[in-house]
Amino acid sequence: MAGDGESDVQMLELKSIIGFNGKVSAGLKVHPDRQHIIYPLGNVVIIEDIQTKKQRYLNGHTNDVSCLAISKSGKYIASGQVTHMGFKADLIIWNYETNDIYCRLSLHKVKVQSLAFSPNDLYLLSLGGQDDGSVVIWDVKAKQSICGSQAALKSAGMTYCVAYSNSNDNIFVTGGDRTLRVWELDRGNRKIRPTDCTMGQLKRVVTSIEVSENDQFFYCGTTSGDVLKVSVEKQLFRHYGPAKNKYSKGITALALVKTDEMLVGAGDGTVALIKGDTFKKVKSVKIADAGAITSIALRGNGHQFFVGTENAQTYRFNFAEFTYNLISTCHSNPVNDIVFPFGSSDLFATCSENDIRVWHGSKEMLRISVPNITCHAIDFMRDGRSIISAWNDGKIRAFLPESGRLHYCIEDAHNKGVTAIAATSDCKRIVSGGGEGQVRVWKIGSESQKMVDAMKEHKGSVSCIKVHKNDTECISASSDGTCIIWDLIRFVRNQVIFANTLFKCVFYHPGGMQLITSGTDRKIGYWGCIDGAQIREVEGSKSGSINGMDIASDGKYFVTGSKDRLIKVWDYKEAEVTHVGIGHSGFINRLKICPNQKIIVSVSHDGAILCWDYPF
């Protein structure tokens, strides 16, 4: 490809990442230096300074990170990943100081479920997922496995979690579905020997384990919403509680505090402090809209602690007052679109399943929630008075950008969901595209919204609509392999472009005489507006479709984002790549250059939003 193999392709500077995978159990950690939090996002592990918010990234996994562990000294971080069926999933030990890979270990099939370091950093314990079911001890210094064993009896279910003793490098605990075992490592004979805990009549599914500081007992959180207390030495079940008012949707996170009290997080968003053998509730607070609490991480002795939730939100709690404040939020589902208001570069809006969010830098300013429905596309009206959005229930919804209130809603705009939307610059009309292939024009009055015309030519869903700057024509790209230029005065087809691809994006060059398209054939096409003839075609990506594209307002450069997770900046005239951005861990869905050409914002399938410095 032109310019791609040459040495003058430079790297894009990544400014910041907005994102956190809250679905990873105990994925949010505080480093022993008390200055950094560590969390996963897609296939990257992010180390963030608590005070300055400066981020470092650990890149090395080929798929989503599924578990994290930090050694007691803080020297190493271990992370495991998932992979495709039939393949082995890697686990990586990272050097914390230098951010590089200390060693890459591979034994478990499909998924690494849980990890734990021994107290003196001698060993790493890893547990395989559902398709693997084995527990393995690794020698950290020698970078190789010592021994392994099946994690549970054949009669028991899956094992979910592991925990190491706090002082003895040879003792650890595993727990899961009707299984709870204390293991001892015999280093001389390279064997690990399990002892099943005597549970009597009690049947529980253990999802989290914490070992007390003096190593006498360990505590387990269960899906039944209670906590078990078991002796390490005698492997005997001692107590469980609370007997009544168990935690709704199970206990999903546990942390022990120095004062013999315990913090628990529940599936309904409750964070509580409990103590004693009866596990009596001392303090409790329920976080609204958070989903399940998946991580509780103590900072130091726990005067402050951090909570991570399933809906990708992180909170900082004050232990004494038991108050909390939101530190960061992001989308927990794929982000489908990103858009800047006309002439403003400070704010941008993104949309996903269930919601639209307006951001200022990396801070969320506004969230507009529409539960259980996916928003496919958004646009700001030119006057900035409303955000228009396309939803998969076939409705076009317009919201007020300050309050997020619903301004108006066009029912049954398209019968297979609205998939693309654009507004004219005079703010009087909206052009929308649907899953059935129709392009419809709507007249927007102060009181009413009515359909002016429906243009039926496309056979597949409409993926992108752009209105010409003079408002007299628009172009729609479709998955049927055509782009059609429509006359917005007579509502007829002016020109059609055919290509052997599912078109994803189309843009007018700011000059207004040329078009640029991209799609699943990995090609970028230049076309003439008047005759629809192809001017040139370049290969835009080595693998995967080009899902996102945007042209700078001066028309000199454009950017593309594709399924290969790379962002490329192109010279428009030369059709050559000038810069490449590496940092996304999911497929890139859309990207935009801000109006003042300072930053590029890209959004991806794993819910992440990345901000890059615009190089020119």
Image: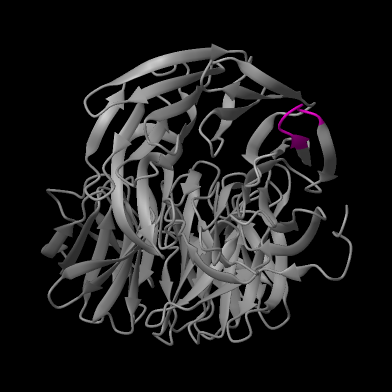
Give the residue displayed 53% in from the left and 86% down from the top: 120
Q: Percent position (x, y) of residue 296?
A: 33, 66
Judge whether residue 411 can be spotted in this image: no
Front residue (pair 175, 21): 21
Judge whether residue 176 can be spotted in this image: yes
Q: Percent position (x, y) of residue 21?
A: 46, 56
Q: Percent position (x, y) of residue 42?
A: 56, 56
Vertically, is 375 above or below 325?
above
Magenta span of residues:
527-533
Give the residue displayed 40% in from the left and 55% down from the top: 330
Q: Is residue 185 left or right of residue 529?
A: left
Vertically, is 367 above or below 168?
above
User: Residue 196, located in which quarter of the rendered image?
Assistant: bottom left
Q: Is residue 396 left or right of residue 603?
A: left
Could you tell me what secondary structure mostly forms the magenta stretch? loop
**Is 578 within the magenta?**
no
